[in-house]
Image (cartoon, helix red, strand yellow):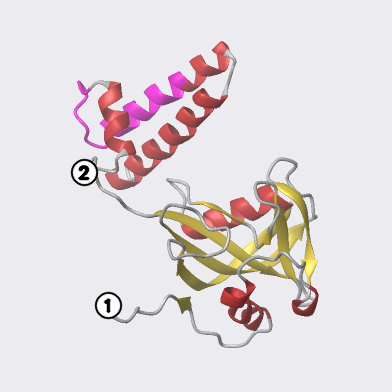
Amino acid sequence: MAGIDDQRLLEWSAALIRASEEAIEASDSLYEKERFEEVLRVAGDIACAAGVPADTPLEAVCEWLRSDRRKPDAVVPKVAVGAAVGNEAGELLLIQRSDSGVWLYPTGWADVGYSPAEVVVKEVEEETGIEVEPVRLIAVLDRFRPVPGGQSFGFYSLLFHCRAVGGSLRPHPLECLDAGWFAEDALPPNTVGYNRWGPTVFGALRGEPVEVLFDRMRPPPG
């Protein structure tokens, strides 16, 4: 393990645990469940190599990594990562979400073991078939504040300006009802949140020096 620090090993362990537990939960195949349980054991071995005592039960290792060493009752926001992808015509890549029917830029939950920029690349290709290159972070938004169709729990949304570099448009059959490229004056009527992110996104697509968009301080009560 020379050249690999303990923190990186723990990140790999947490990523394996998360993916394996989701696969075990989703699968009806006993064979698949057994194989992913083996991956969990390997994740425990990796954690031990990073300094977790070797005699620690696997269940304890998994719980420790899942909790990210936070207090069990800690309430913290989730993190979503989105992509404002532009093409040579200055159009924006949008998907029609299968869960709500609204149109929005590709977005997904951050995965343990991936940087936000890596999540962006992965999510866009999975959802649309388009290969992208992150250019810069252009927005950090608190989605706990009331928004139409918003979630009932708190999460932060990181939005990256991305450049399309390859692939072809292939909407994911489960996550997307449709997908396409749209000019600023021809967005679908049920595009959600445009008034909030639109000027920043299309400014970035035009090459303008936009500032990072973020939620400003609210005035004190009273």
For residue 192, side relative to residue 189 (left or right): left
Vertical placement of residue 85 versus 29, above or below? below
Q: CA distance from mark 1 to mark 2?
A: 30 Å
Q: Quadrant of residue 29?
A: top right
The numbered mark at residue 192 is none
Asked if residue 46 lies in the magenta stretch, the reply is yes
Q: Position of residue 28 (x, y in %)?
A: 59, 17
Q: Label 1: how many residues lie within 10 Å, few (<14), some (14-19) or many (20+)?
A: few
Q: Quarter-wise, where is residue 31 in the image?
A: top right
Residue to which mark 1 is pinned = 221
Circle 1 or circle 2, nearest the eye: 1
Circle 1: residue type: Pro
Name the residue: 64% across, 58% down: 106
| Res 71 label | 2
Give the image location of residue 39, x and y in percent: 45, 24
Q: Is any part of residue 5 visible from this angle?
A: no
Q: Is 140 displayed left or right of 219 in the figure?
A: right
User: Which of 218 and 162 lies nearest the eye of the viewer?
Assistant: 218
| 183 within the magenta span | no
Horizontal arrangement in the rendering, residue 81 relative to residue 76 (left or right):
right
Q: Give the residues drawn in magenta, as a range.
A: 37-56
Q: Position of residue 217 (x, y in %)?
A: 34, 79
**Relative to 85, is 172 above or below?**
above
- Which residue is the extreme one toward the front? 222
